[in-house]
Amino acid sequence: MSVSLLIAIVTDSVSEQALDIAEREGIKGATILPASGISQTPVKTFFGLTFQASMTLLFWIADHDTANRAAQALNDELDLDSPQQGLALTLAIDRLYGLNVPGATLPGAQP
């Protein structure tokens, strides 16, 4: 079974919900980093000021199917296709060291 890295960049206000969604889909444990960024279309507020919400960067490692299922659940439940909501993506992992993912068959993964 292949392993994937699931990355979600979401607003701080929904980061706990994102963690709950991933756990419900079968992914336990995450790496969490505070983040900020500049969007292509800043959100205008009072008096023409722009607003950038604080973001959270979440990383999970899981088997390919679980990571993709969790990414879809994040998209559906956090409405990531709407502007300014965040994003979720998965990346295939070729090598994995230091983490035992059940069912992983990668070089360096623990059997």
Image (tube, grey):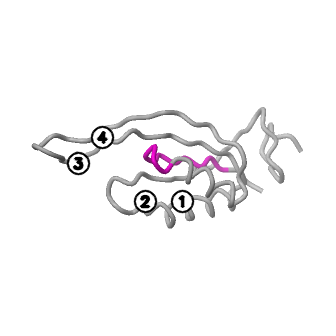
Q: For the residue marked with disc 2, what is the amino acid?
A: Leu
* Side (left or right) of 3 relative to 90: right
Distance from label 3 to label 4 (Cα)? 7 Å
For label 4, the crowd category at 10 Å Cα-Cα, with few meaning under 14, some 14 to 19 and many 20 or more, is some
Are dots 2 and 1 in contact, CB under 8 Å? yes
Quadrant the C terminus occupies: top right
Residue drawn at (62%, 37%) of the image: 31
Residue on which disc 2 sits: 80
Determine which of the numbered discs, if any, sits on residue 52 in the image.
4
Sequence-first disc among 2 and 1: 1
The amino acid beneath tag 4 is Gln
- Mark 3, secondary structure of its residue: strand
Callout 3 touching callout 1 (CB < 8 Å) = no
| Sequence-wise first label, 2 or 4 | 4
Could you say which disc has been placed on residue 109 in the image? Answer: none
Residue 74, numbered circle:
1
Q: Check residue 11 for magenta coloring.
A: yes
Which sits earlier in the primary sequence, circle 3 or circle 2?
3
The magenta-colored residue range is 4-14
